[in-house]
Amino acid sequence: MNALENSQIRDIALAPKGHDKINWVKNHMPILNQLEDEFRRTQPFAGKKVAICLHLEAKTAYLALVIQAGGAEVSVAASNPLSTQDDVVAALVDSGVTAFAWYGATDEEYFGHIDALIHTRPDLFIDDGGDMTSLFHSKYPELLENIVGGAEETTTGIIRLRSMANDGALKIPMIAVNDAMTKYFFDNRYGTGQSSWDAIMRTTNLVVAGKTAVIAGYGWCGKGAAMRAKGLGAKVIVTEVDPIKAIEAIMDGFQVMKMVDAAPLGDFFLTVTGDKKVITEEHFAVMKDKAILANAGHFDVEIDKEALNKMCVKHGHTKPNIEEYHFADGRKVYLLGEGRLVNLAAGDGHPAEIMDLTFALQALSLEYVLNNPGLANTVHSVPKEIDERVAKIKLQALNVSIDALTAEQQEYLSSWQL
C-alpha cells in the first residue's frame, strides 16, 4: 500500500513544500548530518526493512531518510493522527519511503495504518508509545519471527514495554531510548517545555505573563513545562503524586498542591504525567471561566474528555485546535488539540536541535540491535558509549571542547584505597 494511492494525499504537488520543511530541519541537525554521511559509507542497514511509527513531521522525516541512506527499505506510519503533516508524508513518498498516514485519521484508520506497517514485515522498527509493539504481539505474533529488535521513544511506551517484559509477553529485544541521558535531559525537559508553550501560545494568542499555570506531573517533561511557564512570567502550581518530586518542585520555587485545590486557581492547565484521568469532573466543576486545558502526555487520556462531554450543555470549535465546552452555570473551558499532544497536534513539535539528539540515539540504537544478535527479549538501556557519542558530536557541532581525565585521575576515581 502506497500513501499516494491509499491516503488522502492525492497530489504529488504537496511534496515540494514537504521537502522544504525537511531541508530546513536538516540544516539544524548536525548529529544526524554526520550519521547520514557515515551510513552512506558503511551501509549498516543494507538489505534490511525498517519500520518507523513516530510523529510524521519534518524531523522524523529526516530520520527516516538517514536510515534509508544506510541502505534500509523504510516504511512509516503515524504515532498520532493529529501530528501528521501531509506535505511531509508526500515528500517521503517522493523520496522512496512507503508511508501509511494522513492528518486527522480516525481511530480505525490510525490502527489500520500501523497494521499495514507491520505487514511490511520489517527487520527492525522504532515505536512511539508502544502501539506498534502492542499490536505486533497481540494480533500478529507470528510476524515477530522476522524481527531482530526495536527501539522505543517515550516514557509511556517504556512503561508498557516493561509491563510486557514483567509478564513474560515481550518476545523481542527493545531499546529504551527515552531512558538515555541525552534523551530525557534535553528532549523531555527542554523540548517539551518549549514546544508545548509554543503551541499553546500559537493556538490561543493569549498572554501567559501574570496568569497561573498548573503543571500536572513533575517528571522531566513537567520540569521543562514549569520552567518555561515561569520564564514566560506565569505563576506556577505543580500537582504531583510522588512525594520526592513534590519536594523537588517546592525547592525549585513552585507551589505544590492537589489538583482539586489548583483547579479554581489555574488559567492554563498542562498535563504531563502519562497517566489517565488526571483532570476530571470534580476539577472541571470548580475551574475558572475560560480556563485553557492542554496535554503533553503521549495519549489523549489525561484530560477526561468523556466527563467534559457529559458535563457540557454546548460544545463547538471556536478556531482551529480549540474546542469550547459550555457548562450549565455559564462557565466555559477550552480544550486544545483534542487533548492530544498539544506540541504536535497544535504545533511543530520539539525544536530541531533537540530532536537531533533523540533521533541520533534512535538510529544508533537500531544499528546496535542489528550488530548484537542474540539480545535477550526484554527492555535494554541505550549503551553508555552511544549516549556519550551523541553528546560528543553535539559538543563538536557547538564548537565546545571539554577536559578529559588524566590516567592518574582515572586511577584515583577507580580506587578504593587511601
Image (cartoon, helix red, strand yellow):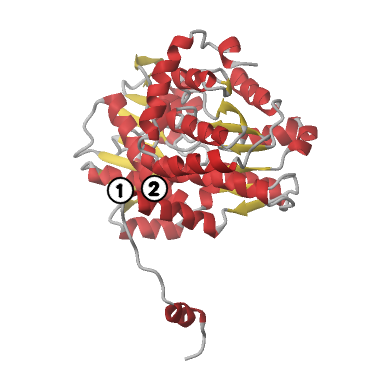
- Position of 226 with respect to 70 (left or right) is left
Q: Nearer the viewer, residue 393 or 42?
A: 42
Q: Quadrant of residue 348?
A: top left
Give the residue at x 67% y 24%. Answer: 115
The correct choice, above or below, for 239 with respect to 124 in the image is below
Q: Residues within 10 Å of mark 2 (few under 14, many from 20)?
A: many
Give the alpha-carbon distance from disc 2 to disc 1, as whole Å: 9 Å
User: Tag 1 or tag 2, which sits nearer the N-term?
Assistant: 2
Q: Residue furthest right?
A: 142
Residue placed farthest to the top in the image? 10
- Depicted 235 relative to depicted 304: above or below: below
Is 375 left or right of 188, judged from the image as shown?
right
Query: The N terminus lies in which quarter of the figure?
Result: top right
Residue 136 place in picture, x, y as percent: 71, 33
Q: Which residue is mark 2?
A: 189
Residue located at (51% from left, 42% from top): 274
Q: Is residue 221 left or right of residue 68?
A: left
Is mark 2 in CB contact (under 8 Å) with mark 1? yes
What is the quadrant of residue 270 in the picture?
Answer: top left
Q: Which numbered dot is residue 154?
A: none
Residue 152 location in percent, x, y?
A: 58, 42
Tell me: residue 202, above or below residue 275: above
Amino acid carrying mark 1 in the image: Met
Q: Which of pointers 2 and 1 indicates the residue nearer the eye? A: 2
Asked if residue 273 is positioned above or below residue 289 in the image, the reply reads below
| Mark 1 lies on residue | 227
Q: Amino acid at mark 2?
A: Arg
Query: Callout 1: helix, strand or loop?
Result: helix
